[in-house]
Amino acid sequence: MICQNERIEDLGCGGLKIIQNKDLYTFTSDSVILANFLKIKNNEDAVEIGCGCGVISILATAKNKCKNIKAFEINSHMAGLAKRNIELNNLQEKIEIILDDVKNYKKYIKIGEIDVIFSNPPYMKEIEEKPNLNKTREFARHDNLLKIQDLCRCAGQMLKFGGRFYVVYCAERSAELIVELIKNNLQPKTMFYTENGKGKVVLVVIESVKGGKVGVKVLPNLVTNEQNGKFLEKLQTRNFIE
């Protein structure tokens, strides 16, 4: 059942669909980029940190042969929407939505148990709470509830040795991200930046490996928009990083 201010969109991938609510935080190209970049092998256990409406986990099941995904979401409204999207696509046996702060992961997951973790976390600097603030929307953008230090610490603890962490973050904070990854024994192995159609670098996307050797492959920048700002359709339909 669709509520007021909601719409159903076709994800352009295997008939998958997604419910979006304009009053909540709607997913952006960041999610599509990460979903196309991450790799989950057959029978691997995966975790998503901050799943929002569930779009990345949903796309990941279509593009990979993962055994199951535990998707953490701290916001009750977004977690509820994610559960509805899982049901809409009949993925209840593949994806479990966990309404909790990922810092409480030990209630659900053992240390060193997970093969793959992925996250499109809030990456803008913390903002001051205001009475008229739409907390669902703003905390999906700002790191009030999930600092980069906690993100990398939890990922490093949950992963097996050799496990992989995929993350997308704002480009201007890429140095902070890399420092925290290495601090938590997550060695960056593959990375690239995205840029809009006007040459501005916007995002950094990194695959790191727990206990990996030093050395990172830097891929060419990925242009995500045309010069007029229109999102390139190819990002919605196929993997673009080989």
Image (cartoon, rainbow, N blue to C red):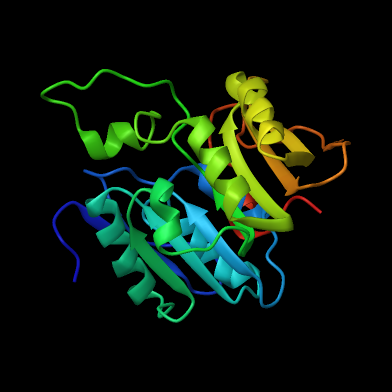
The residue sitting at 78% across, 47% down in the picture is: 211
Expressed as whole percent of the image width and height from the top left, the position of residue 156 reads 62, 46
Q: Quadrant of residue 172?
A: top right
Q: Position of residue 241 (x, y in %)?
A: 76, 50
Instruction: From the viewer's perspective, tell me whether residue 57 is left or right of residue 165.
Output: left
**Is residue 176 depicted above or below 118 in this figure?**
above
Query: Which residue is found at the position 49% from the left and 77% from the top?
Result: 94
Please state the horizontal and vertical placement of residue 189, each as a whole percent of the image.
Answer: 81, 42
Do we see residue 164 in this rendering?
A: yes
- 17 or 145, which lies in front? 145
43 to 208, vertically: above or below: below
Q: Is 84 rendered above or below residue 111?
A: below
For the C terminus, the quadrant is bottom right
- Whether residue 8 is visible, yes or no, is no
Q: Picture quarter containing residue 106? A: bottom left
Residue located 36% across and 62% down the image: 98
Front residue of 186 and 122? 186
Q: Which residue corresponds to the image point at 46% horizontal and 43% vertical from the top-left?
A: 28
Viewer-nearest residue: 116 or 202: 116
Quadrant of the drawing holding the N terminus: bottom left
Vertical relation: 217 (above or below) 56: above
> Could you tell me residue 174's position as x and y percent?
64, 25
Q: Residue furthest left?
A: 131
**Total tally of numbered discs in the picture:** 0
